[in-house]
Amino acid sequence: MHGDYYGTLREPVLANLKNGMDVLIDIDTQGAATIRNCDDPIVRQALTDVFIMPPDLDELRRRLTKRGTETAQQIDSRLATAAREMELWRDYRYTIISGSVEEDLKRFRHIMAAESYLSRRLTSEMTPKTTRG
């Protein structure tokens, strides 16, 4: 992304998932698509994809400019990428329209809490025991 290459090691992710731990990965839309298409059943079962989207490109420009960490050219490049990526929000299970960091974190925590109650996430140790009479 933007001339940089990133990657997440598969084995540590799988090891944590197998041990019942949630794994949070901050990735771009290409990485999310790769994970969404993963053939590993453990990964597919654990996946909760959340797209965090700015309210609009003007607000994103304001936020990037306020940070003061990038040149105007870098900001323009990021905005062009963001415009393309914002078209993909429907590919995700959840989308958060970004407000403040605190609001975004609260919304994300609500999503993760809801996901923890999904029936498919129950392990055999958690499954209620039934008796037949």
Image: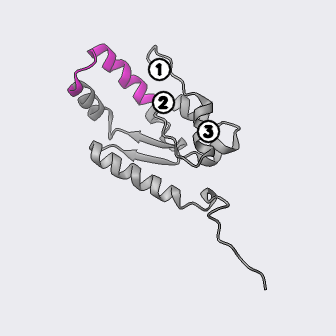
> Is 82 positioned to the left or the right of 49 in the image?
left
Q: Which residue is mark 1?
A: 1
Residue type at the position of mark 3: Ala
Q: Residue at x 53, y 61 (%)?
A: 117
Within 10 Å of disc 3 (Cα), the crowding (few <14, some 14-19, many 20+) is: few
Tag 1 secondary structure:
loop
The answer to whether marks 3 and 2 mark residues whose Cβ atoms lie closer than 8 Å is no
CA gap, disc 1 to disc 3?
Answer: 27 Å
Q: Residue at x 61, y 64 (%)?
A: 126
Q: Position of residue 86 (x, y in %)?
A: 43, 35
Residue 28: mark: 2
> Is 103 positioned to the left or the right of 119 in the image?
left
Q: Nearer the viewer, residue 19 or 96?
A: 19
Q: Which of pointers 3 and 2 lies earlier in the amino acid sequence?
A: 3
> Is residue 93 within the magenta segment?
no
Q: Nearer the viewer, residue 117 or 27?
A: 117
Residue 106: mark: none
Residue type at the position of mark 1: Met
Q: Residue at x 47, y 20 (%)?
A: 1
Q: Which residue is mark 3?
A: 15
Task: Give the vertical position of 20 relative to 16 (above or below).
Answer: below
Q: Which of pointers 1 and 2 lies earlier in the amino acid sequence?
A: 1
Residue type at the position of mark 2: Asp
The residue stretch that appears in magenta: 66-84
Task: Give the vertical position of 75 relative to 45 (above or below).
Answer: above
Task: Give the vertical position of 88 relative to 48 (above or below).
Answer: above
Q: Position of residue 85 (x, y in %)?
A: 46, 31
Tag 3 secondary structure:
helix
Q: Quadrant of the C terminus?
A: bottom right
Please identify, in this view, whether the residue under mark 1 or under mark 3 is nearer the observer. 3
